[in-house]
Image (cartoon, grey):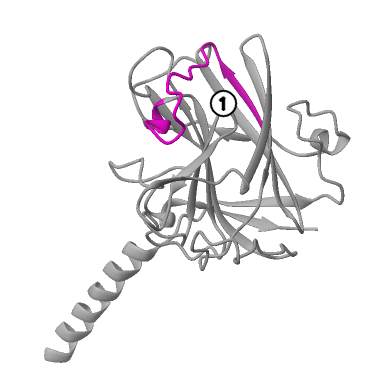
Amino acid sequence: MKWTIYFLLLLCITSCSDSKSKKNTQITPVSYIKEAPTLDGRPIENYWNLLEWQPIDQNWIGGPFDHGDYNGKYKMAWNEDGLYILLEIVDDTLLEQTEDPLKLWWNDDCVIVYVDEDNSGGQHRFNHNAFTYHVALDGNVVDLGVNEKPTLYNDHVISKHQTEGNTTYWEMHVKVYPSIFNDKPTVKPVVLSEGKRIGFAIAYADNDNSKKRENLIGSVFVPGENKNAGWIDANVFGTLELLK
């Protein structure tokens, strides 16, 4: 009887530990391209037509939204130099109210790219175990640095967008940096290869005309009450699998 109780207790502890460390199981295959797209917000390269759209439809912050106000999706490709992302965002109001890119950057309309190079999960608030890149309408890219202050990472994510009516097309090149990155230029981005798995999510912050963002809509389902966990916890990211 004593050994039975011990075994059940050990099983419970193991299960609880696994549940805390379990990663999001959403896996997205990503196709290889030889030539990088021209980053101009105009997806005229033929290979974009061959790739499947993925939805950005999980409401992480805010109340219900109308698809006339917001609708979003993305496509991805890769080569040795990094990830390439095409987004189609339907948004009837594009708002950029804060001139200083290092102040209140999360309240303007922006795309947020979450990257975990080794797909290890874990906390990353003031380290680069993973990144949360806020890509603003003016092209500035903000995340928290190892000094615990907002920092520009404009050389990590290069983006261009074009708006026609209520639809904005974004094209992005995301360089993938390792967890040892310490905000020093001596640490270079990794060279991507077939079979690599990368933790990843993408989201859109929507603000029509408020002091604070009204919605944050993401690409992966996040269980529990705190849907906006990705900015500090890479365990909720999905996984990219690089294929050729």
Residue 37 pos. (x, y %) = 81, 39
Question: Is 46 included in the stretch rendered in magenta?
Answer: no
> Going 86% across and 47% down the picture, which residue do you hit?
35
Q: Nearer the viewer, residue 199 or 209?
A: 209
Q: Which residues are magenta?
A: 87-107
> Going 59% across and 18% down the picture, which residue do you hit?
90
Q: On the rendered structure, is 135 left or right of 31?
A: left
**For the stretch drawn in magenta, what is the main secondary structure?**
loop
Q: On the rendered structure, is 226 left or right of 93?
A: left
Query: Would you name the residue on which mark 1 appears?
Result: 137
Q: Quadrant of the N terminus?
A: bottom left
Q: On the rendered structure, is 52 left or right of 144?
A: right
Mark 1 element type: loop
> Going 65% across and 52% down the picture, which residue do you hit?
175
> Furthest-left residue in view?
2
Q: Quadrant of residue 11?
A: bottom left
Question: Above or below — where is 40 with respect to 3?
Answer: above
Q: Quadrant of residue 192?
A: bottom right
Q: Quadrant of the C terminus?
A: bottom right
Q: Amino acid at mark 1?
A: Leu
Q: Nearer the viewer, residue 157 or 169?
A: 157
Q: Residues within 10 Å of mark 1 (few under 14, many from 20)?
A: some
Q: How many marks?
A: 1
Residue 199 pos. (x, y %) = 54, 56
Residue 49 pos. (x, y %) = 82, 33
Residue 108 pos. (x, y %) = 44, 24
Question: Is 89 included in the stretch rendered in magenta?
Answer: yes
Question: Above or below — where is 37 with respect to 188?
Answer: above
> Going 52% across and 19% down the picture, which residue do you hit?
70
Q: Nearer the viewer, residue 243 or 40?
A: 40
